[in-house]
């Protein structure tokens, strides 16, 4: 009978520990994922901005030497990520494949122009900067036209600002919820041992002596939950890196260290504080109140 009761108590204890670890893991995993997003938000936003092209169309009087000189200026410009020269004959072939007709033969000449397709570094793809770059290009008398999607630039920047703001708000809300969830799980774990706490107190054990094993056990559970959350966040980082290799998330070891270190420290701090106040509450209760 005693052995059966002991097995029941052991199963209940393991179940209690498992629920605490699961709560810590889920909450810290979510917070860590949001933290990883926030730290890499600039990279993510720049990745979207850098995919917005600008096309420069040159007049027919622009000679190969003129184009070569212009290309040299592009190579040295700090705002240029990459560029590609599109010869008007190549553009005509591509256009013929799209529309399915040989319009050059029909017109008797190629109406298209030599052009450069340019992608900028992300920090320059904002309204004021890209407008200034556009005006600089238009000062070149050899350039016929400068074309880019101005509305898309504004839309991307507005959405990035909104997303960043709401991620910060959501992170703060989840940080608060995480504390409540972990605190509730730990309080339930301590609640199941309230009679043991009171018995130890009645035989003369000090409050710090009684708290120590509870806090140490909770901190160990916090460490386990934190390590599982770190593994989950690293898996998310690996997945994101495989889908968006230009972000180089795994290569940014400093950011990963900050996120993983933050998860581990938060897991320890929350479990320590929650267990301290939970045990303190039962230590201050009278024996009659335990029921």
Image (cartoon, rainbow, N blue to C red):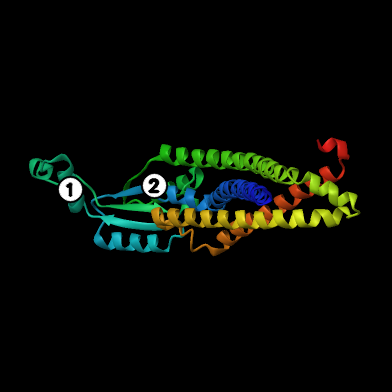
| Mark drawn on residue 52 | 2
Whole-number angstrom distance, CA of label 1 to CA of label 2:
22 Å
Residue at coordinates 54% horizontally, 64% vertically from top-left? 253
Residue at coordinates 58% horizontally, 51% vertically from top-left? 32
Side of 39 relative to 285 (left or right): left
List x then y, in percent, for residue 178: 65, 43
Front label number (1 vs 2): 2
List x then y, in percent, for residue 260: 59, 58
Tags 1 and 2 touching, CB below 8 Å: no
Viewer-proximal residue, 223 or 208?
A: 208
Side of 213 relative to 94 (left or right): right
Quadrant occupied by the C terminus: top right
List x then y, in percent, for residue 252: 52, 62
- How busy is the neighbourhood of tag 1: few (under 14 within 10 Å), some, or many (20 plus)? some
The secondary element bearing badge 1 is classed as helix
Look at the image and tell me whether residue 163 can be seen. Answer: yes
| Mark drawn on residue 5 | none
List x then y, in percent, for residue 204: 91, 54
Please give the count of numbered marks on the rendered protein.
Answer: 2
Viewer-proximal residue, 242 or 142?
A: 242
Side of 101 relative to 183 (left or right): left
Which of the 4 image quadrants contains residue 242? bottom left
The secondary element bearing badge 2 is classed as loop
**Residue sticking out furthest to the front:** 1
Viewer-proximal residue, 200 or 186?
A: 200
Viewer-proximal residue, 192 or 58?
A: 192
| Mark drawn on residue 92 | 1
């Amino acid at each position: 009978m005693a052995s059966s009761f002991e097995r029941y108590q052991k199963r209940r204890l393991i179940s209690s520990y498992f629920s605490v670890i699961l709560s810590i893991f889920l909450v810290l995993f979510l917070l860590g994922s949001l933290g990883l997003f926030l730290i890499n938000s600039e990279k993510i936003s720049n990745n979207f901005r850098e995919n917005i092209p600008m096309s420069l169309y040159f007049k027919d009087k622009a000679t190969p030497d003129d184009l070569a000189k212009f290309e040299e200026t592009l190579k040295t410009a700090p705002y240029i990520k990459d560029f590609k020269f599109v010869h008007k004959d190549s553009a005509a072939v591509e256009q013929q494949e799209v529309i399915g007709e040989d319009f050059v033969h029909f017109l008797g000449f190629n109406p298209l122009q030599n052009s450069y397709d340019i992608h900028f570094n992300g920090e320059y793809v904002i309204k004021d900067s890209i407008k200034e770059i556009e005006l600089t290009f238009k000062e070149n008398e050899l350039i016929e036209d400068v074309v880019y999607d101005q509305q898309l630039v504004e839309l991307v920047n507005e959405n990035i600002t909104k997303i960043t703001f709401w991620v910060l708000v959501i992170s703060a809300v989840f940080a608060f919820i995480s504390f409540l969830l972990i605190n509730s799980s730990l309080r339930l774990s301590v609640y199941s041992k309230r009679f043991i706490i009171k018995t130890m107190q009645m035989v003369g054990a000090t409050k710090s002596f009684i708290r120590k094993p509870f806090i140490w056990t909770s901190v160990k559970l916090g460490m386990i939950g934190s390590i599982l959350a770190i593994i989950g966040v690293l898996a998310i980082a690996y997945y994101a890196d495989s889908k968006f290799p230009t972000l180089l998330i795994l290569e940014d070891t400093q950011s990963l260290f900050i996120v993983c270190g933050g998860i581990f420290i938060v897991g320890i701090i929350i479990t320590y504080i929650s267990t301290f106040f939970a045990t303190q509450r039962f230590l201050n209760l009278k024996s009659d109140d335990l029921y």
